Amino acid sequence: MQYAFLAYTPSEETDRATRPIPGALADLFDQPDVTGWARLHAHESATTLRNDEGRMLLTDGPFIDSKEYLAGLILIEADNLDRALAIAEGMLQETRPGTAIEVRPVLAGHFRGA
């Protein structure tokens, strides 16, 4: 089954896009379980599109205001949730304090990493 890891980081970490990915974490991204990943710019760069009863509303900025923001998306293959959580825990140990990883099963779709 494919799982998505949504990596959240404190909002004050907006300079992270200019920093290299730490070596140990980069090595984990190269593991066979990881099928793709994307590092995202800071939440201020977001544009939100919302369907309001057929009218499309365009808003600068993220959909919600939060102390954390979605910093990246990692797709993995795992036999079950326990294995997915173990992979996420290994990655979380290599991140900065305050980072969170949300684990969700993927319903459908395909993503190919760079």
Image (spheres, rainbow, N blue to C red):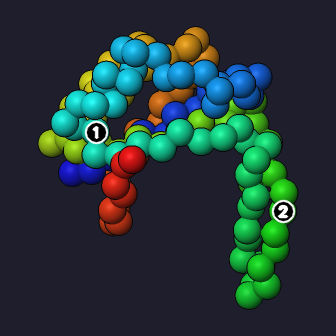
- From where the camera sits, is residue 3 visible? yes
Identify which residue, 89 or 12, lies in the foreground: 12
Secondary element type, mark 1: strand
- From where the camera sits, is residue 64 visible? no
Alpha carbon distance from label 1 to label 2: 33 Å
Q: Residue at x 48, y 31 (%)?
A: 101
Earlier in the chain: of badge 1 and badge 2, it is: 1
Task: Identify the mark at residue 85; answer none if there is no mark.
Answer: none
| Residue 42 falls in image quadrant | top right
* Tally of numbered discs: 2
Q: Can you name the residue that lies furthest to the bottom here?
A: 54
Residue type pointed to by label 1: Val
Note whether 80 is above or below 27 in the view shown: below
Residue type pointed to by label 2: Thr
Give x and y (percent) for residue 89. Answer: 35, 21
Give x and y (percent) for residue 4. Answer: 39, 46
Q: Residue at x 39, y 47 (%)?
A: 114
- Residue under numbered circle 2: 59
Task: Identify the mark at residue 34; answer none if there is no mark.
Answer: 1
Give x and y (percent) for residue 63. Answer: 74, 54
Identify which residue, 45 or 65, lies in the foreground: 45
Q: Residue at x 52, y 34 (%)?
A: 7
Give x and y (percent) for residue 46. Answer: 74, 51
Secondary element type, mark 2: strand
Category of crowding for the residue at label 2, using alpha-carbon neighbours closer than 10 angstroms: few (below 14), some (14–19), many (at least 20): few
| Residue 16 falls in image quadrant | top right
Note whether 96 is above or below 60 in the view shown: above
Note whether 31 is above or below 75 in the view shown: above
